[in-house]
Amino acid sequence: MTDLTRATAAELGRLIASGEASAEEVTRAHLDRIGEVDERVHAFLHVDTDGAVEAARAIDSARAKGEQLGPLAGVPVAVKDVIATTGVPTTAGSKILENWRPPYDATIMTRMRAAGLVMLGKTNMDEFAMGSSTEYSAYGPTNNPWDLGRIPGGSGGGSAASLAAYEAPLAIGTDTGGSIRQPGAVTGTVGAKPTYGGTSRYGLIAFSSSLDTPGPCARTIEDAALLHAVIAGHDPRDSTSIPAPVPDVVGAARLGASGDLSGVKLGLVKEFAGEGAEPGVSAAFRDALDALVKLGAEVVEVSCPHFEYALPAYYLIAPSECSSNLARFDGVRYGLRTGDDGSKSLEEVMSLTREAGFGAEVKRRIIIGTYALSSGYYDAYYGQAQKVRTLITRDFAAAFEKADVLVSPTTPFVAFPFGSRTSDPYQMYLADLYTIPSNLYGGPAISVPCGLSEGLPVGFQIMAPTLADDRMYRVGGALESALGTLTPPAL
Amino acid sequence: MAAISREEVAHLARLSRLAVTDEELDRFAGQLDVILQSVARVGEVAADDIPPTSHSVPLTNVLREDVVVPGLSQAEALSGAPDAEQGRFRVPRILEEEA
């Protein structure tokens, strides 16, 4: 039999449905692979061996009874540790939630379980999803399977690395400023941020509520679309969930794979056309663009003059919302409590708990957010950033008058060595330069592997209008059909 | 000119209930100054006539029928608490006890 860990999720689903492989065999193959390589990769914070085998057996027995199963039934998935999951710890990469076991499942988790997906475990991430390298995880970084001395991207570096290391065929990420797409880019995998509100935030530990978006990570476009279809759709438990039908992303991915992009207009964002990107990243991006033109796509230049203000606006809006959201970690209802020796007040215990439980980047962002929201500075910082958000949304609207999707590199640089951007926090922020505009606007965007620079993967970003998630899957499917997928060196 | 001083960072840390150390204050003050000087550029473009956007999805007042649906039990809600007593969260003292 072929190596089950190298198969796509779609193939695994077919093998399980036809009885050529059992869900338990597929799950055990991935658990074995995790046992073999994760000591070096450190993609996982928690591996749920017993739970995974039990879930896989339930699928096998359902199939034996002749039950009708979905296309991903029995297929394993790795879940970012910011998604609440019953039965296993959920830490968000933070010491303040060490060993916390959520009393409920996130909506996307409920939907994955209902679709028969088998959760392998929880993946590493920058603490509370704040970072671009997993170096801000309280549990140590994840190593990029392409080069173990380099970052796997972040915040969802664990999910992306688990795919590149063939530890899982599918993974869940969350994208607030690029935390699905940038890890996808630097690990040579696919990462999709759905339309904001297209996937439920219920049970997602909040970082920046107006931006946070859960989404699929995979090694192929079709696999990402299949997982997207499982988790997306209106959820009454999330007040910002959009009550609209989910676009046919799977059909779009397959249409794209047929390799015909006649009549599709790709908007080349003038302001992002390689400026600020490493030469090798720009070169791979240009080559990919040429490949899409050969498939019939037309390139039109679009101007988004306010995109250059997206990064500053984001680094005011996200910390502001984080300073408010993370107030809930007060040592009272869940998580860590430090210094409660009977002599200290609630306020002192709270301050000691938060000091001990949060890492440096989280503290920096809480302090910045508190500053930006404080009276006297609110108008100059948070208020202005919200106006920039309007201008960026207008830029997108104007660009989509001329183009069906917008394209850019996903991130300006390939995977960088550990420690090279931690001393200056702002240098780390630049990793999200091209991904942030879609978060501020709310539209969907995907990163697709488009070649190598210096032997390391480069990502091609496709941005689509709000609720037109299918468009990015069509173009992504076409790009994949032209360029193929990337295979990392053997671990 | 610095956008933010060490004293301001100390004040903000207190407001944020973070018992930061002197070493952290030294480090954060410089780092936060760099970040704030960089993000202050938002002031260059946003004019008075531009409305703010708080949210990309224009949804308001999401309502539902007032019917009872299952929620967490008391035991589940308390399951992660650092300290609980008699079915409630137990907290350190809130009022000062003056002798």
Image (tube, rainbow, N blue to C red):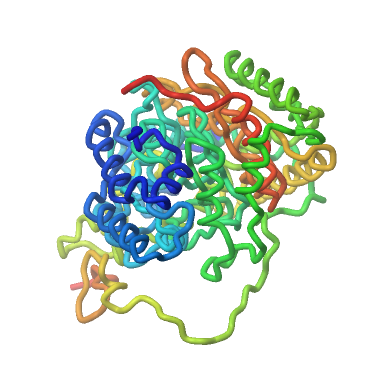
> Which residue does the image show at 55% across and 71% down from the upper left?
A236
Query: What percent of the width, then of the height, locates residue A303?
Result: 79, 31
Considering depth in this image, is A111 or B48 the residue closer to the camera? A111
Q: Quadrant of the C terminus of chain A?
A: top left
Asked which quadrant contains residue B27, the reply is top left
> Which residue does the image show at 63% across and 36% down from the upper left?
A257
Question: Visible in this render: residue B15?
Answer: no
Identity of the residue furthest to the left in this view: A341
Query: What percent of the width, then of the height, locates residue A405?
Result: 73, 38
> Which residue does the image show at 34% across and 52% down from the upper left?
A119
Q: Is residue A99 above or below residue A272?
A: below
Q: Is residue A140 above or below residue A487?
A: below
> Which residue does the image show at 79% across and 42% down from the upper left?
A400
Q: Is residue A203 left or right of residue A383?
A: left
Asked which quadrant contains residue A238, the reply is bottom right
Considering depth in this image, is A300 or A337 the residue closer to the camera? A300
Q: Quadrant of the N terminus of chain A?
A: top left
Query: What percent of the width, then of the height, locates residue A72?
Result: 45, 52
Q: Is residue A53 left or right of residue A476?
A: left
Question: Visible in this render: residue A38?
Answer: yes
Numbered circles on residues, count: 0
Query: What percent of the width, then of the height, locates residue A285?
Result: 64, 22
Asked which quadrant contains residue A335, the reply is bottom left
Considering depth in this image, is A458 or A394 the residue closer to the camera? A458
